[in-house]
Structure formats: structure tokens, C-alpha cells
């Protein structure tokens, strides 16, 4: 059970980091390419970056909770 929670947290961290990286590329591209629709693409990229930031934070909280729970179980058993 704890392993699956660690795994879910780890996958969430990876996905969030990927989302932030992709969004950062979108922000950089929006600054380079001066095309119509720039404000829309830039704001979409910034929102995706913020979403990734929240995903990483939430996933880190899941991993920490699983770690704390495992520590408590070990303390009980010893």
C-alpha cells in the first residue's frame, strides 16, 4: 500500500516537472516568435506552468505523507 502511494507521488512529480518544462518552452517560444495570438499563447503557457507548480507541490505532499506514515509504522513495530 505504501509503495503504491510513493509510486503515485513520484509519477505526479515527474508529470508536474514535465508540464513546467514544456510550459517554460512555450513561454520562451512566445518571446521569440512575434506572431498574432501571442498574448493568448503566452497566458496559456503561464497557466500551464502554474498548474505544473501546483501538481509538483501536491505530489511532494503525497510522498511526504507516505514517508511519515511509513516512519510511524516502523516506530510502532520496533
Image: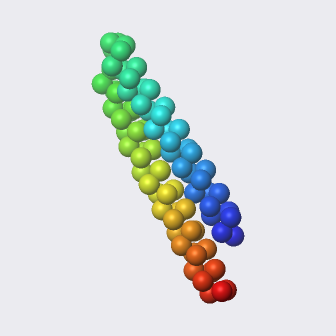
Q: Taking 32 as reference, is 63 above or below it? A: below
Image: 71 above or below 14: below
How far across and down, in percent of the image, does residue 71 sit? 58, 76
- Depth check, front residue: 78 or 62: 78
> Does residue 37 appear anywhere in the picture?
no
Asked whether residue 45 is in view, the answer is yes
Would you identify the image quadrant in which residue 20 lies? top left
Q: Residue furthest front?
A: 78
Q: Residue at x 47, y 34 (%)?
A: 21
The residue lying furthest to the left in this view is 39
Left or right: 74 as drawn, with respect to 47: right
Q: How is the image coloured?
A: rainbow
Number of labels in the image equals 0
Residue 47: which quarter of the image? top left
Q: Nearer the viewer, residue 40 or 75?
A: 75
Q: Residue at x 54, y 49 (%)?
A: 13
Q: Residue at x 40, y 20 (%)?
A: 29
Relative placement, left or right, of 34 versus 61 is left
Residue 32, image x, y percentages: 35, 15
Query: Where 34 sits versus 59, above or below?
Result: above
> At which x and y percent is residue 33?
37, 13
Query: Where does the image place residue 1, in percent across and percent down from the top left?
Result: 69, 70
Q: Nearer the viewer, residue 38 or 26?
A: 26
Quadrant placement of the C terminus:
bottom right
| Residue drawn at 37 percent across, 27 percent down | 27
Amino acid at each position: 500500500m505504501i509503495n503504491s502511494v510513493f509510486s503515485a507521488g513520484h509519477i505526479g512529480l515527474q508529470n508536474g516537472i514535465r508540464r513546467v518544462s514544456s510550459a517554460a518552452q512555450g513561454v520562451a517560444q512566445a518571446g521569440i516568435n512575434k506572431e498574432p495570438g501571442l498574448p493568448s499563447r503566452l497566458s496559456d503557457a503561464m497557466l500551464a506552468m502554474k498548474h505544473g507548480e501546483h501538481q509538483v507541490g501536491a505530489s511532494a505532499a503525497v510522498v511526504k505523507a507516505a514517508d511519515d506514515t511509513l516512519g510511524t509504522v516502523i516506530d510502532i513495530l520496533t
